[in-house]
Image (cartoon, rainbow, N blue to C red):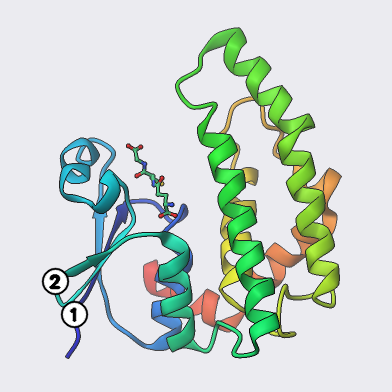
Amino acid sequence: MTHYKLTYFDMDGGRAEPARIAFHAAGIAIEDNRISFAEFPEARKSARFNSVPTLEIDGVMVSQSNAMNRFAGKMAGLYPEDPIQALYCDEVMDALEDISHYIVRTFGLEGDALKQAREDLVSGWLATYLRGLDALLQRGGGEYFAGNQMSVADLKCFVQIRGLQAGHLEHIPTDIVQRLAPSLNEHKARIESDPRVAAYYQSRS
Ligand SMILES: N[C@@H](CCC(=O)N[C@@H](CS)C(=O)NCC(=O)O)C(=O)O
C-alpha cells in the first residue's frame, strides 16, 4: 500500500490543511507528521526548498501545497475534471497563496511598524483580494468557486477565512471578511458544515 507522509506544523490550519481534509475525504490514511514551531528550524533543513508542507509518497518528497491540494483533490473527487472549472479552481488557490505571502511579509515587524504594515494590508491587498475572491465566488454561481460543487479551492478559502477570523493576527480586525466580503463568510459556514469537512474535524476531536 502506498505510504503518504504529510509534514506540516501542528495546527488545524495553514497550507497543509486542505490536503489533510481532502485525503480524509478520499478515505486515504496518511502519516500526519505534525511538527512544532520549535522543531521547524531543524526540520526545514531536510525539506524541499527548506519549506513545509512536504508530502512524501513512498519516500519520494514533493513540495508546493497547491500541487498537493490538486493531487489529494483528484483522489477525493474534489478537483474539477472540466479544464475551465479546473482553471477557476487553480486561480482561487493561487490567489489565496498571494494573500498568505502578503501576510507573511508583515511577520517579524513589531510595534508601530507592525501596526502600519497591517493597516496598510487591511486597506490595500487584503481588501483587494477579499473583494476579488467574492467576485470569483459569484462567477462560480455563489455557492462554490468551480464546477457547482465543493473543490479544494473551497477548502483552501475556508481555511484562510477561518484563519483571518481567529484573531491571531494583530491589527487585522476579525470582522474584515464580514465587512468587505460577506459572501465569503457565508461560504466558510457552508464548507465547514459539509459532511466531508465535518467528518474530518470529528476525526480530529
Ligand atoms: N509555495 C510553497 C510555500 C511554502 C512556505 O512558504 N511554507 C512556509 C510555512 S507555511 C515555510 O516553510 N517557510 C519557510 C521559512 O519560513 O523558513 C507552498 O505553497 O507550499
Residue extending farthest to the top is 112
Q: Nearer the viewer, residue 37 or 101?
A: 101
Above or below, 124 relative to 204? above
**Crowd rating for badge 1 (residues with CA inside 10 Å; few <14, some 14–19, many 20+):** some
Q: Nearer the viewer, residue 199 or 64?
A: 64
Residue 193 in view (yes/no): no
Mark closer to the observer (2, 1):
2
Residue 169 picture location, percent across and down: 57, 32
Quadrant of the image occupied by residue 27: bottom left
Q: Nearer the viewer, residue 126 or 36?
A: 126
Q: Amino acid at mark 1?
A: His
Residue 137 picture location, percent across and down: 79, 67
Q: Element under label 2?
A: loop
Q: Nearer the viewer, residue 181 or 127?
A: 127
Q: Element under label 1?
A: loop
Task: Return the residue at label 1.
Answer: 3
Above or below, 119 relative to 70? above
Residue 53 in view (yes/no): yes
Left or right: 176, with 101 as reference point: right
Left or right: 56, with 161 as reference point: left
Question: Mark 2 to mark 1: distance in Å?
Answer: 8 Å
Q: Amino acid at mark 2?
A: Gly
Residue at position x 43%, y 87% in the image: 75
Residue at position x 59%, y 90% in the image: 81
